[in-house]
């Protein structure tokens, strides 16, 4: 893509009413536009990141043979009345009313609607186990949305739900999903600072599991055993829990963290009130044993902006960067511009995603914008680079600088892996 075709522009300053570092950086770099507190429009660069994260998650879900669905935004009151429709039970719903007076809920979560839906498809033990996953926009009527993309009133997530015959069958799938989540965060560049964290399982299991990424911007407090690589949430930080998990209080360090994913054993919490059951081989009926698995994708983007940025701007991992290469050309020399344009087409033809800064701006502004946008590799075509051997190559993450002959650029990038 040629940068001159982007309608977005970088900004020196973030909006005055934006307090969160993640949103400040993403707004300034042209990835998102702030519509209102807790509501962000994803711009072209942001959409590319969003889709790449979605693709990584989708690959892991389908690797476990989880089937995709597209859930609805509008939800029926009569389904939720059997569990938690009232504002006392869920105080951050957006609700609406049809013209005929029928009350509806607006996509708060999907345990109830999908449980009710699966009654049409699960009757026999032969229909189990099964699982579905869903990408969609969720609405939450948060009282204060002050953490940028990490706590929105409108956000994008992946939710998955499993349906099993019993706890033993469920547990097999649960462990597989736990491993899939670890792989997801590793691929997103967060693996080294994201920890499996024991949290409350509510009324239906002793523990749930969160995936917490260390960050000073985090809203959660966890206690981490760095040697074992596991943690407990502050809400379950008790002597009996630590003993149960084989953890010693003196080995734990207190950390602030951002919850980027969670997995729950739901047991029969929703299948029983909504009468989702199956008939076994002997003709006896049982309630389906369920699980729930969530990842907030827009929250992930905010988290990555918080923890992988530096004083110059964003620093995207290659796996989700909007482009792999940012190509800059300095000056008005027609030969240099022609060389840069040829390199741009060569990169595209080689299947390398490239953003070409062909704008009529000075070198200083282009370099500042490149640092702020945070694409992994920066190539510069200039008289200075030519004098040093050809094309300047900078790795955004490490700051390593090198000069390559023009005919070596493609082969170098083809063989280079992010360090």
Image (cartoon, rainbow, N blue to C red):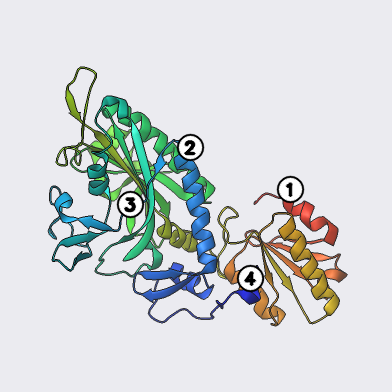
Residue hosting label 4: 370
How far apart are labels 1 and 4 at the CA level?
A: 23 Å
**Is residue 84 rendered to the left or right of residue 18?**
left
Q: Earlier in the sequence, mark 1 or mark 3?
A: 3
Residue hosting label 1: 415
How far apart are labels 2 and 3 at the CA level?
A: 21 Å
Tag 1–tag 3 contact (CB < 8 Å): no
Q: Earlier in the sequence, mark 1 or mark 4?
A: 4
Residue 63 image label: 2
Q: Earlier in the sequence, mark 2 or mark 4?
A: 2
Residue hosting label 3: 71
Element class at badge 3: loop
The structure residue drawn at horizontal position 22% and vertical position 47%, both measured from the top left corner, is 112
**Residue lying furthest front in this view?**
100
Element class at badge 4: helix
Task: From the viewer's side, name the closer residue of 36 and 274.
Answer: 274
Q: Earlier in the sequence, mark 3 or mark 4?
A: 3
Residue 350 image label: none
How far apart are labels 1 and 3 at the CA level?
A: 41 Å
Measuring from the top left, give residue 368's x and y in whole percent.
63, 75
**Is residue 203 rendered to the left or right of residue 221?**
left
């Amino acid at each position: 893509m040629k940068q001159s075709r982007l309608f977005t522009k970088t900004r020196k300053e973030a909006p005055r009413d934006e307090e969160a570092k993640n949103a400040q950086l993403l707004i300034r770099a042209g990835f998102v536009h702030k519509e209102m507190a807790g509501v962000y429009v994803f711009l072209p660069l942001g959409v590319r990141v969003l889709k790449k994260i979605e693709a990584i998650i989708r690959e892991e879900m389908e690797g476990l043979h989880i089937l995709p669905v597209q859930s609805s935004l509008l939800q029926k009151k009569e389904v939720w009345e059997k569990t938690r429709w009232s504002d006392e039970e869920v105080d951050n719903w957006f609700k609406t009313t049809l013209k005929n007076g029928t009350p509806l809920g607006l996509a708060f979560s999907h345990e109830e609607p999908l449980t009710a839906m699966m009654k049409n498809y699960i009757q026999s033990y032969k229909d189990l186990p099964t699982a579905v996953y869903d990408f969609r926009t969720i609405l939450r009527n948060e009282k204060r949305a002050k953490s940028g993309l990490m706590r929105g009133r409108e956000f994008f997530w992946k939710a998955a739900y499993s349906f099993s015959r019993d706890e033993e069958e469920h547990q097999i799938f649960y462990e597989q999903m736990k491993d899939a989540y670890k792989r997801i965060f590793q691929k997103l560049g967060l693996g080294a600072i994201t920890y499996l964290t024991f949290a409350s399982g509510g009324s239906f299991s002793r523990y749930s599991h969160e995936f917490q990424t260390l960050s000073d911007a985090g809203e959660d407090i966890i206690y981490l055993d760095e040697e074992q690589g596991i943690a407990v949430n502050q809400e379950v930080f008790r002597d009996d829990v630590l003993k149960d998990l084989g953890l010693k209080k003196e080995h734990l360090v207190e950390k602030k963290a951002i919850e980027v994913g969670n997995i729950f054993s739901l047991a029969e919490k929703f299948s029983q009130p909504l009468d989702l059951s199956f008939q076994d081989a002997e003709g006896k009926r049982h309630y389906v044993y369920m699980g729930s698995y969530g990842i907030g994708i827009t929250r992930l983007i905010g988290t990555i902006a918080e923890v992988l940025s530096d004083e110059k701007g964003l620093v995207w991992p290659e796996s989700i960067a909007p482009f792999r290469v940012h190509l800059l050309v300095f000056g008005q020399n027609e030969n240099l511009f022609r060389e840069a344009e040829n390199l741009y087409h060569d990169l595209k033809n080689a299947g390398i995603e490239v953003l070409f800064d062909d704008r009529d701006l000075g070198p200083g502004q282009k370099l500042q914008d490149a640092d702020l946008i945070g694409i992994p590799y920066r190539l510069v075509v200039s008289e200075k680079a030519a004098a040093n051997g050809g094309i300047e190559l900078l790795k955004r993450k490490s700051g390593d600088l090198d000069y390559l002959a023009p005919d070596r650029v493609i082969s170098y990038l083809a063989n280079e892996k992010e360090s």
